[in-house]
Image: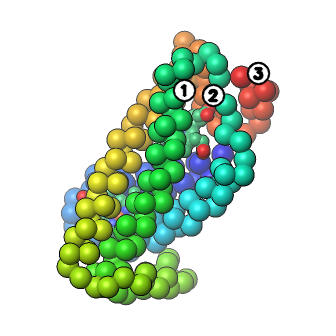
Amino acid sequence: MALHWIMAALIVWNLASMMLTPQAWARTLLPTHMAVGLTVLLLSLVRLLWRLTHRWPPLPATIPLWERRLARGSHALFYVLMLAVPLSGWLMVSASSGRAVNWFGVASIPPLPVASSRYAVAAFYEMHEIGATLMAGLLLLHVAGALRHSLPDGGTPLLLRMLPRRSAYQKKS
Ligand code: HEM
Ligand code: HEM
């Protein structure tokens, strides 16, 4: 749960700071964007490890099967994108400048060993942009799904399952 909410805040910040701000702001925010993105990459590895070693809490049977499948499919796609989007960003910067990324002024993250080429930069940029756009679309679907079930007459307050001290509800569902 902690990883989910911390990472959600970081990813939403990275998406919003690049997609919803004027270009001049986005440029100024780029160093923070890269540092936040590399943090997301590290946390994604920890989260993936957790996911592979802990059972996925089953979704309540009150939710129709097709919705449970859609939810699980989108969660799995999130895992792919949580790794692929920051990785493609890091590859893009490595192939472009070959410079280390400054991590909030406390560490210098070396570039990935990729050859510097215009074509590589363009390909990684496309991957980064398409991946991030997919992520933003998936986020809208995800939030709509969570809210649909959590609103007063939605039947299954999924949001409560993602808050601590709600184990009683978790056990019932
Ligand atoms: C959660 C992770 C990340 C998300 C959601 C994300 C999302 C985005 C988005 C939406 C854009 C705007 C794309 C466009 O021009 O339409 C962007 C641009 C960019 N990202 Fe990321 N990013 C992430 C991580 C990273 C990382 C780790 C790096 C590098 C270390 C990075 C480097 C860049 C750069 C350099 C640009 C600007 C490209 C340009 O317009 O010249 N990003 N990112
Ligand atoms: C980009 C940001 C987000 C990502 C990448 C993300 C990803 C995920 C993933 C992968 C899961 C499955 C559980 C896991 O393995 O961790 C999950 C569950 C969940 N998410 Fe998000 N999430 C994001 C933002 C949000 C937001 C903003 C909300 C609030 C409306 C939300 C509400 C939930 C809920 C309620 C569940 C639990 C579903 C269940 O009961 O099993 N998420 N999320």
Kind of element beneath mark 3: helix
The amino acid beneath tag 1 is Arg
Q: Position of residue 96 (x, y in %)?
A: 28, 81
Q: Position of residue 77 (x, y in %)?
A: 46, 45
Mark 1 within 8 Å of ligand 2, using the beta carbon: no
Question: Of residues 169 and 16, which is closer to you in this image?
Answer: 169
| Marks 1 and 3, the one that precedes in the sequence | 1
Contact, mark 2 vs mark 1 (Cβ under 8 Å):
yes
Q: Which residue is mark 3?
A: 172
Question: Of residues 62 and 27, which is closer to you in this image?
Answer: 62
The amino acid beneath tag 2 is Leu
Residue 89: quarter of image: bottom left
The CA span between labels 2 and 1 is 7 Å
134 shown above or below 46:
above
Contact, mark 2 vs mark 3 (Cβ under 8 Å):
no
Mark 3 within 8 Å of ligand 2, using the beta carbon: no
Kind of element beneath mark 2: loop
The CA span between labels 1 and 3 is 17 Å
Kind of element beneath mark 1: helix
Whether residue 70 is visible here, answered yes or no, is yes
| Marks 2 and 3, the one that precedes in the sequence | 2
Identify the residue shown where x is 43% and y is 67%. Answer: 87
Q: Which label is found at residue 68? A: 1
Task: Name the quadrant of the C terminus.
Answer: top right
118 shown above or below 82:
below
Q: Residues within 10 Å of mark 3 (few under 14, many from 20)?
A: few
Identify the residue shown where x is 51% and y is 62%. Answer: 40
| Marks 2 and 1, the one that precedes in the sequence | 2
Q: Nearer the viewer, mark 2 or mark 3?
A: 2
The CA span between labels 2 and 3 is 11 Å
Q: Nearer the viewer, mark 1 or mark 3?
A: 1
Mark 2 within 8 Å of ligand 2, using the beta carbon: yes
